[in-house]
Image (cartoon, rainbow, N blue to C red):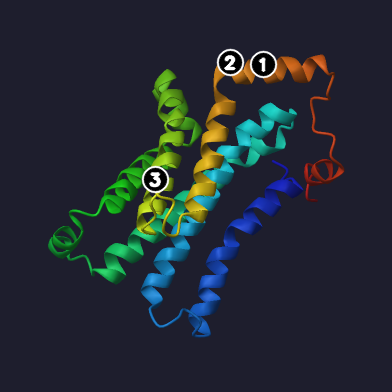
Amino acid sequence: MDITRLQFFAHLTAWVPAILLVWDYLTGGLTADPVQTVTQRTGRAAIFFLVLSLSCTPLNILTGYKGTIRIRRALGLYSFMYAALHMIVFFVLDYRLDFSLIFLENFNKLYLWLGFCSFLLLSALAITSYPWWMRLLGKAWKILHRSVYIVGLLTVLHHLFARKGNLISLQGDIGAPLVYGVIVVILLVLRTPIIKRWWIQKRLKLKLPREFPGLILRYLDKPLF
């Protein structure tokens, strides 16, 4: 199968956070608390690529451009990869698999429970993202994978509470979680059947081309070689 420029760019971009982490490790640039730094950076990468993955279908709905659909699964798997690294660093490097200590120190921390639930759901989506599972599960596969928006909302809440933010009083470090939260809600609204049908009908009525007319995206949609 030919790899388009957009697919190549998506894969290349997805490895940038990992490459930068390795570079900072080799050059001593992980700050005085490297475990915390790696935990935070892998978490940010996970939510970033999750939101990018969530945006693929709405972008297809808005523009008719199909290229985003072809990179949706890859972006979701990269999100899972960084989320798995995030969990490994927390359990192995931070607590050295001392589960009793993890439970005692974190039992009342809501953000950890939100993150854990989000990771379990994301793991199920990653494992069942292959065509074999789609055939095996049938209609249940589509229902399961619609829960990706639940993953998105749980991840945003995890991010918010981990940064000790308060949405009600608008206090704390809520900037990034708030932006991600608004984006996820907008993407979810665009996926609702009523909005989806309304926009597609409007797009067809305006006789917009099925493929997004932007020169950049046309260029990215061509085979790499």
Instruction: Report x, y in % for residue 143.
Output: 42, 24
Residue 74 appearing in the image: no
Residue 163 appearing in the image: yes
In the rendered picture of this protein, how many numbered marks are placed on residues? 3
User: Cβ–Cβ below 8 Å for labels 2 and 1?
Assistant: yes
Q: In the displayed structure, would residue 109 be above or below residue 38?
A: above
- Side of 56 where 214 appears, left or right: right
Q: In the displayed structure, would residue 222 be above or below residue 86?
A: above
Instruction: Report x, y in % for residue 193.
Output: 56, 17
Which of discs 1 and 3 lies nearer the camera? The answer is 3
Residue sitting at 52 percent across and 78 percent down?
A: 24
Q: Amino acid at mark 3?
A: Ile
Residue denoted by label 3: 168
As measured in the structure, the alpha-carbon distance from the residue carrying label 1 to the one carrying label 3 is 33 Å
Q: Amino acid at mark 2?
A: Ile
Marker disc for residue 194: 2
Marker disc for residue 182: none
Which numbered disc flags the more N-terminal residue, 1 or 3?
3
Which numbered disc flags the more N-terminal residue, 3 or 2?
3
The residue closer to the viewer here, 126 or 211, is 211
Residue denoted by label 1: 198
As measured in the structure, the alpha-carbon distance from the residue carrying label 3 to the one carrying label 2 is 30 Å
Task: Name the secondary structure under disc 1.
Answer: helix
Instruction: Report x, y in % for residue 15.
Output: 58, 61
